[in-house]
Image (cartoon, coloured by chain):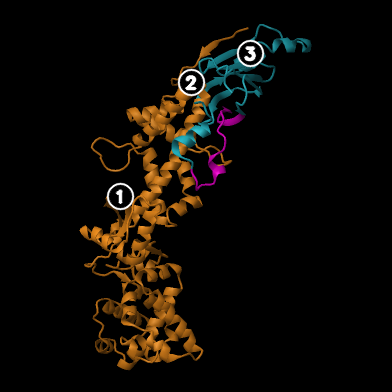
Amino acid sequence: MSSQTATIQPVLRHEHRPFHAAPLACLIERIACAADRQALCELQNHRTPCRLGNRPPLTVLRFIVALFEMSWVYRLCGHDQMVVERARDLTNDKFSRLRSQGDDAGSDCRTSYAGVLRTIRAWNTAHPRAHALELEAAAACILQRSIQCHVRFSSKEARRYCNPLRSRFAWRLSGGTIHVWIPTSLGGKRRRKWLEENIPDPDPSRPSERQRVQSIIDDRLGVPRVVELPSDSSLGSTRRGDDPAEMLWLEDDPEPIELGEVVAEEKAQRINQLRPSIQALGPARLRELIVHIFRRLANDEYDQKELAAAYPVKEPTLSRFAGKNWDDVSSVPDLWVNTAQVLAGDERYVEAAIEAGVWSNVRTVLDNHRAERKGGDKDGQRALFHPDYRRGLAAVRLEARGPGSVRAYHRPRA
Amino acid sequence: MACSIEQWTTDSFGAPDDPPRQAFEATRRCELLLERDGNRVGAWILDRFPFRAAVVHAQPGLYRLSASTGWTLWVETLTPSELLFTHAFPNQGLPLAAQTEELIFLSTREVSVLNGALTIRVRPGLESGVLELLFTGPGDAP
């Protein structure tokens, strides 16, 4: 009989994986305390500490990806794909990015792993008789919980980052502080003044006071939001940067892509359904005319005579097609009915229209258009139009963000 | 002070209320996996101590014993001289059928890991070997 006894030390037989025999707690300690990239590489690529239901064990990164495919995370992120992606990147960074010297920006996974390590040590202290495999299972469980928590934190952080139209404000009162979200259009010292004038009887100690204050703010100032629209390759030519801050309304924006361009495209494709005199323009010229009308409206420079001469169409024809003085016409100009139909055809447009404060007008246009087709009341319809409607529509703009992404947004109300 | 892993971590990080609980609250147990040349040949949950398991028909190859988290506990290449009786004991004749029960207690290799808590024993056979795992645990472990 030849029998040998050997003790495997936690040392390494694989030169390319120096930590292959190190337990999870040891790896986490190396990462948190020594910024050891090899330990991080071992954890990321060769360890499967996470579990999701009955699925096979998952690596940290695969677990994060799996979490971000779950509906509760989408809910946390406000069902916004851009927020989801940013939250996932943030979470990945928190568990995989080691900041190098001189790099002060962004997450450092040492911070996250240091928190995990503290909890593992505390668990070990509370369970001094636990054997190595129990400690390994506990460490895996603790790490997984930490990832879940960071998914939550990252989602909140991403929501803050991805909505540059609002920012948090700490309203300090004698009895404490209330943190609320206020549109960035109301800035600086005006915020405190506005709150003092508009929020009656604030009391930080009152239950749900923050929610009460926030709802008053939302009601009176609105909730500016960035709304994503389906991609349209024809709108991708004005590609902009990836910084969400660019989605802010820029007064000096030379050529934002407007809702008008979408309507123009739609009308050009269905030109045969328009009045003969408009059909005579041809699709390209019609597209140009509609875009021109929207841009002129947005700048309060809409001159029917000038446009009629430029394209050319007869002025009464243009008036019926896209009349400026809506209160004076007996029926809604075709273009505004068409625009309302485009808006109502997609819930994301609807959201943008609501934000722009023109949705009720859009509804009225559509309702009266339907009534008119059935022989409805034209007097009632006439009275419902107001110049604010066209200004509101002109404020609903689209912005191309690369070939695959188009956004709609509206001018935040001051 | 002692509590389950799940209770402890829940207290430490706060119970998640949104995600489906069953996806996260599954009991985390100690698990062992055995692979030969990258293919799984055995998996066990260590739910009682002492824990014993045997892998029969063990053929030569690279064996790796790990926790389910990927922690490698043991990795060795087992050769015919460790798994086949005729290679391991060339000077002994093939055992008669009546003698095989006695001979199976011979081992060619014994490895101790986790500070002696886990012992891996290799026994040769006529056409394949047997790997035995014995996990004693800390003695008063659950």
Mark 2 belongs to which subunit?
A
Q: What is the CA distance from the residue labelled 3 to the residue labelled 1?
A: 80 Å
Residue A82: horizontal and vertical position, in percent? 39, 55
The kind of residue on which mark 1 rests is Thr
Residue on which the image places disc 3: B87
Residue A390: horizontal and vertical position, in percent? 33, 79
Q: A159 and A206: which one is in front?
A: A206
Magenta span has B28?
yes
Mark carried by residue A353: none
The answer to whether the residues at label 3 and label 1 have Cβ atoms under 8 Å apart is: no
The kind of residue on which mark 2 rests is Pro
Q: Is residue A250 above or below residue A126?
A: below
Left or right, residue B86 beside residue A297? right
Report the chain shown in orange. Answer: A
Work out which quarter of the rendered image holds the C terminus of chain B and state it: top right
Residue found at the far right of this picture:
B98
Left or right, residue A206 beside residue A309? right
Residue A225 seen in this snapshot: no
Q: What is the CA distance from the residue labelled 2 to the residue labelled 1?
A: 43 Å
Q: Are marks 2 and 1 on the same chain?
A: yes
Residue A253: horizontal and vertical position, in percent? 24, 67
Report the chain shown in cyan. Answer: B
Left or right, residue A325 beside residue A116? left
Q: B115 and A78: which one is in front?
A: A78
Looking at the rendered structure, the secondary structure element under dot 2 is loop
Residue on which the image places disc 1: A177
Residue B114 seen in this snapshot: yes
Residue on which the image places disc 2: A128
Q: Which residues are magenta?
A: B16-43
Counting residues from the N terminus, which is met first, the one under dot 2 or under dot 1?
2
Residue A168: horizontal and vertical position, in percent? 30, 54
